[in-house]
Amino acid sequence: MKLHQLQALIASAETGSIRGAARSLNLSQAAVTKALRELETAQQLPLFVRTPSGLNFTEYGKVLLTHARLVLKQLEHAQAELDQLRGKNSGRLCVGVTPWIALTLLPEVVLEFRQRMPEVRLELFESLMAVAQPLLRDGSMDFAIGQLHPSQAPQDFSCETLLDYQTSVLVRQGHARQDARSIHELLDQQWTLNYAPDGHDALMQDLFWRHGAQIDERRIVRAHSLAILQMLVEHGDMCTWGPTIMSTAPPFLGRLVSLQLEEQFEPRHLSIVTRCNVALSNPALCFTDCLLQVIRRHARSARKEDRALFETVRLRV
């Protein structure tokens, strides 16, 4: 396998067509087609099929695509480290950021990172773990700032915990059940939740089952973005479960209510999540250091807004 063949494979997957791949790589369509044919011939396996709507990858192609992305990501890391030794910071950094950090501390973190590494191209994802996990696995994302359930951590990912935060059931201000005192009073309500593909049982256990609560799961809408979840809670009268800090974050202050239920939920962990056995690049280490500096600065602050923000958070670092 040659580098230009893997680049053609990845570009074809990302654009969905030979034409799009050629445009993104600044090559002719004939050159991209040749690279893909050479790759299939060398492997003696069908990697994709052409359809009227574009390219569909076979199972063989999907496996190779995952490894191709990892290879190119490692080469990016190598180039970034060489540039660092030359006294030049460059390259690309892709980071997933959990919504409550994005809504509170992220702008300050990004500005600080920009001052330290202005030449690095930064790409940010709203990182609900359902979105982040597949991107971490295939190397598209360098790391995520988020919560990974302990049952998932040993399998594919490595976690460095930064802080613990409390969770609660959240509803909109004025919800008919905002005075509820038990999860059992909410089982007839509509819910919207977010969880990774392999995180369903862990979430149901933490939220319902360990409290003896059985909910009809047809009442649950699985939301894959904060925007969808927010709209369903605020305009669909749905219940959700998440960081208590969301009810005090500026965009939701006065709009979301954290319910005071008799059931106690285990604190969650905000961590730096990476694929196992993968070292962070210099830009990634810089970004995490900026994050830590901002978190510590606000945690020590006497400002009313910061005290409210960190009331339900405990630092680990």
Image (cartoon, rainbow, N blue to C red):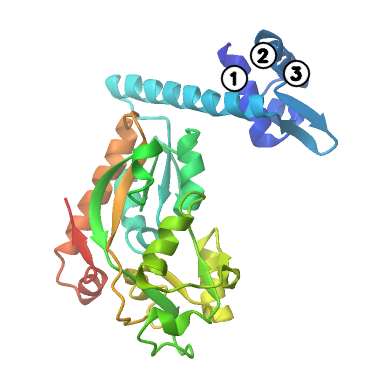
Res 256 seen here: no
Badge 2 element: helix
Which corner quadrant of the image does residue 203 belong to?
A: bottom left
Classify residue 247 by image quadrant: bottom left
Pick the front one: 19 or 238: 238
Q: Position of residue 112 (x, y in %)?
A: 29, 48
- The residue carrying mark 1 is 6
Looking at the rendered structure, the kind of residue marked 3 is: Thr
Badge number at residue 39? 2
Which is nearer the N-term, disc 1 or disc 2? 1
Quadrant of the image containing the N terminus? top right
Q: Identify the secondary structure beneath mark 1.
A: helix
Location of residue 54 with respect to 186 vertically, above or below: above
| C-alpha gap between disc 1 and disc 2 | 8 Å
| Residue 279 badge | none
| Front residue (pair 260, 127) | 260
Q: Residues within 10 Å of mark 2 (few under 14, many from 20)?
A: many
| Discs 1, 3 touching: Cβ within 8 Å | no
Q: Is residue 306 above or below residue 269?
A: below
Disc 1 to disc 3, how far (Cα)? 12 Å
* Residue 91 in view of the camera: yes
Figure label count = 3
Instruction: Identify the residue at image location x=42%, y=81%.
Output: 184
- Residues under numbered marks 1 and 2 in contact, where contact means CB atoms less than 8 Å apart: yes
Q: Amino acid at mark 1?
A: Leu
Which residue is rendered at x = 45% and y = 88% of the image? Answer: 177
